[in-house]
Amino acid sequence: GRLSCRVAGGGAIAPASLAEEKVASTSELTVQAAEVLPFVMAQDSSGASEELEAAISEGNRLFNEGSLESQKEAIFQFEKAIKLSEAANQKDKQAYSLVKLAQLNTVLNNKQNALNLYDQSLLVYRALGDVTRESITLNSIGAIYDSLGKKEKALDYYNQSLLLSRAESDYSREAATLNNIGAVYKDQGNYVEALSFYQQSLILNRRLKNLLHQIDNLNNIGEIYGFQGKYSQALSNYLNALKIFENSESILEGGLGVMIRQRSTLLSVDHFTKEFKKHLYYTISLFYLMRLDNLITQSLIMRRLCLSEEKLKTNLAKVPP
C-alpha cells in the first residue's frame, strides 16, 4: 500500500509517502519559485518622464495590493508603461514593465501570455547586456514550463540560467536554480539526479548561511530518500531541518516572514511557525514508524499529517502569490 497526502496546487510541505509515490517540492514555502525572484528596477540617470514613473508606481501599488481587481488594474498600468518607455527609448523600464506584466499574467494563470512577455523582456535584457536580469528571466520562463508539465523545456531554461549565475559567481541565484533543477528531476522520477542537485544547492546555502533555504534543501533531500525507501537517511535530514528551525528563532524574519507581513494581515508569522514545526514533527514520527514497520500507528500519524498539510495549505492560500 501507499501513503499519500498532497497539497492542492502541486506544493507539498513534506513527503508523506513510500518510495514510489511522488510529492511536490517544498520550494513554494521558501519563496524560491523562480517567477517570484525579485526584479529591481534600474535607476535612470537621465530621469524618466513623470507619466512613465507614475504608471510604474501605480502598477506596483496595485500589484502588491493582491486582489483580483487590483491585479487587473495593474495590467493596464504596466501596458501603459510599456508604451511610454518604448516611446522614450527607456529600455530598462520597458523590460521591467514587461516582467511585471508577465508576473501578473502568471498569477492570473495566463501562462502563455506570460511566456510571450518574458520572451520580449529577455530580448531587451540581452540587448542591454544585463546578465543578472537575463538569468532571472530565464529562470522564470523555466518555472512556467515546469508548471505546464514541459519538463525538458524547463530544464533547458534552468540550465541556461545556471550557466549565467555561475559566470557571475552569483551563489544565491545559483543555489535557487540548482534547487529548481532538482525539483524537475524529482518530478521525472530521476531521484539520483534530483538528489545531486538538491545537495549542491544545500552546499551553497550553507556557505551563504541561508538558514531558511537550508531547511528547504534538507526537506527536499529527505523527500528523495523517502521515495527511495531509505528511511534512516530521510529521517536524518528531517531532524536536521527541524534542528535548524528550532535553533534559529529569527529564520522567519527573512524571506517567508517578510512576505507574509507585507502581503497579508490574515496570517500570523508565529502561528505559521508553530504549524510548520508541528508538521515536521509528524513527518519525523512517520519515518520512525516506517523503520519500525508499525502500520497501525503509521495510519494514525498519517491522518494527522494530512490534517496538518490542510492547515498549512489554508494558511498559505491567504498569502497572495
Image (cartoon, grey):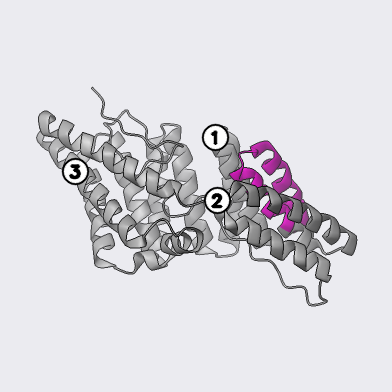
Label for residue 34?
A: 2
**Residue 118 vs residue 222, the one in the foreground:** 118
Q: Residue furthest right?
A: 87
Which is the main secondary structure of the residues drawn in magenta?
A: helix
The earlier-in-sequence mark between 2 and 3 is: 2
Q: Is residue 238 magenta?
A: no
Residue 303 picture location, percent across and down: 22, 34
**Residue 134 vs residue 298, the one in the foreground:** 298
> What type is the residue that disc 2 sits on?
Ala
- Exactly how many numbered labels are in the figure? 3
> How many residues crowd around disc 3 within 10 Å: few (fewer than 14), some, or many (20 or more)?
some
Q: Is residue 124 magenta?
A: yes
**As drawn, is 184 to the left or to the right of 215?**
right
- Mark 2 in CB contact with mark 3 (< 8 angstroms): no
SS class, disc 3:
helix
Residue 313 location, quadrant: top left
Label for residue 85?
A: none
- Mark 2 in CB contact with mark 1 (< 8 angstroms): no
Residue 84 picture location, percent across and down: 85, 60
Residues rendered magenta in the picture: 97-125
Image quadrant where one finds the N terminus? top left
Residue 13 picture location, percent across and down: 35, 44
